[in-house]
Amino acid sequence: MTLQQDWHEQDSSEFIELGEYFVPERQTQMNVVTAMIPPPDSPVEMLDLCCGQGKLSAALLAAFPTATVTGLDLSPAMLDTARRDLAGHGDRFRTERFDLAAHDWRKRPVAPAAVVSSLAVHHLDADGKRALYRDVHTMLRPGGVLVIADLVQPAGPRGVALARAMWNDAVREQSLAGTGGLQAYDKFHALEWSCYEYPDELDKPSPVLDQLGWLREAGFTEVDLYWMKAGHAVFGGVKPAA
């Protein structure tokens, strides 16, 4: 399985331009992710899977001054933007081109203290997510954490309808607040961005309860759902220290 043929640079350009309007409470989600990572007391490595233009990586670098963050992404445009925007962090931020669905990147020279991802894992099918969680558990150092911010599949039609409506409301509010108009909201629909309104083959969200079970199955403890709104959730777990 590969995501290479499904994601295009036009998708990257649109998200770089409009992501701040399209993602409900993006800053809150990043705050939740960083809050669930134990502050390290020594230099550590962290991985940001599908780092995009580097917003979450920047939050990690600011929250954890002893951390070095590697941002991995498929898109050259995303990686170029991340390198440019985070150049002030020097060698504390590195980039690596990868395909999330591939396995060659899952053996690291240094075991990371944290692996995070935002709005990416839903591109994997159920088997792909389960394999990713197992591989990340193996990859992490003892006591390390996996924290994911992602789209999840509501369990029934009423849940889908609610997620769709709440996402529309969030984008509308953020468009008005950010631009004074509905240009971003109109583009959200013109680009058919919401998988709850415009399903496509690229988006494969899984129910959050299934994913919490897969994390426990992989060996994570303290598995929990930390935040959820409009079909977007932040969840994760801890690799036991012993």
Image: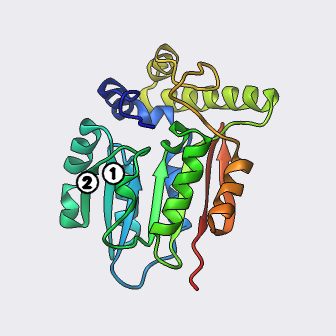
Residue 79, placed above or below residue 56 = above
Q: Say whether residue 177 is visible.
A: no
Q: CA distance from mark 1 to mark 2?
A: 6 Å
Q: Viewer-proximal residue, 107 or 209?
A: 107
Residue 139 percent across, percent down from the top left: 45, 67
Residue 15, placed above or below residue 103 = above
Query: Which quarter of the rendered picture does the C terminus lie within?
Result: bottom right
Q: Which residue is mark 1?
A: 72
Sequence-first tag of 1 and 2: 1
Amino acid, disc 1: Leu
Amino acid, disc 2: Thr
- Residue 85 lies left or right of residue 229; in this view the side is left
Residue 130 percent across, percent down from the top left: 59, 51
Question: Which quarter of the picture shows residue 147?
Answer: bottom right
Query: Which quarter of the rendered picture does the N terminus lie within?
Result: top left
Q: Which circle marks residue 95 in the picture?
A: 2
In contact (CB < 8 Å): disc 1 and disc 2:
yes
Residue 194, placed above or below residue 59 = above
